[in-house]
Image (cartoon, rainbow, N blue to C red):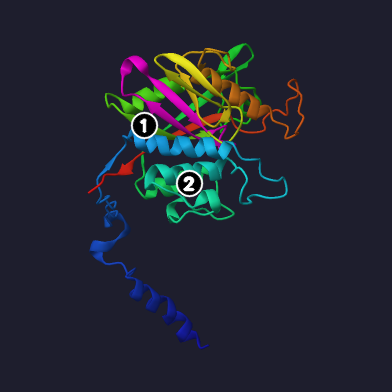
Amino acid sequence: MKLQTLVLLPVIVAVLSGAIWSPGNSPGNIKPASPIKDPNRRTPLFSAEDVERIKQFFIANASLKEQPKDSNWRPGFRHKCINTVRAGLDYLLFGESSIPDSLYSRRAVLNGNFHNNDITALAKRLRDSYYIRSYDTVRFLAIRKGEWVPITKADPVSRGLQPVAMEKSLWNTLLARVGKERGFSVFLVSVCDGYHAALLTLDHRNTAELRAYWADQTHKHPWRFFVNNKLEEVPGKYGWEVMQANGPVKIVKGMARGLDNYMLMANQQFWCDCGRVNQKPGDCCAGNCFPYIQIWRLQKLLSS
């Protein structure tokens, strides 16, 4: 290729792309593009019917056998956490889902590929498609040299310290998100910086009876709920556990667990997880994941 051709090519490309500068189009004068506004009306409040759909799915999914160790997914087995969350969101936002019998949704926003099928990527897709209303984080504190210190990713020393307390209450963070609104709100939850994913439903229809429902695929969350202020439990059923602002860390008969206490325990356990099937309670592989909670408040399209 001749030299003059090589010189002309960048000019031609620049002209075609509109990148040639002019006095009124210098880098300092270019205005950023206005963000595209969502043309649809949405609400962060869900109906009792919306919540009932995801509750029934989570309970049904938890009743299945665990996925074989040699497979990410096989039909007829319990979905793993991120795929369980994706299916739950399908039921919540769109009324039905193909995920229980498949690994993929009919909605592109809920599908990730092999490299980005994680909760952070899922939250980004939902946010970009206007299915997320707001976002919050809860960090953890550790003790170093007798003083409380926040555990941050920017501090390599604190990252190796065991989480001892939450920097702020997750329960109060949920209440701050919903404010004076009344109804059901649903949150996408990342535990220990994406090590585990779940859905958290806040029932704030009545301020005197605030309750949260933890939903995931494990058998660590028995189906528990209140009837006339009495705690009920369905033996052998899992996937939907009622929690309150305050309560015990572990399951106690007749008492609902406290959300903050449970979140602290879960992050501590995941932080220590050695990945062994029969890991003993005292074993700890420090720093398995970064102790950090992220929540995204979801919203749905309003019916026309």
Q: Earlier in the sequence, mark 1 or mark 2?
A: 2
Residue 118 position in % (x across, y down):
55, 45
- Disc 1 marks which residue? 185
- The stretch drawn in magenta includes residue 201: yes
The residue beneath circle 2 is 122
Q: Which mark is residue 113?
A: none
Please name the residue shown 37% across and 25% down the image.
203
Amino acid at dot 2: Leu
Q: Examine the image and state in which quarter residue 265 appears.
A: top right
Picture residue at 26% right of the left edge, 44% below the top: 302
Query: In this rendering, is residue 181 above or below 37?
Result: above
Does residue 60 show up?
A: yes
Q: Nearer the viewer, mark 1 or mark 2?
A: 1
* Residue farthest front in this picture: 235
Give, as a single range, the part of the protein colored magenta: 191-215
Give the quadrant of residue 43: top left
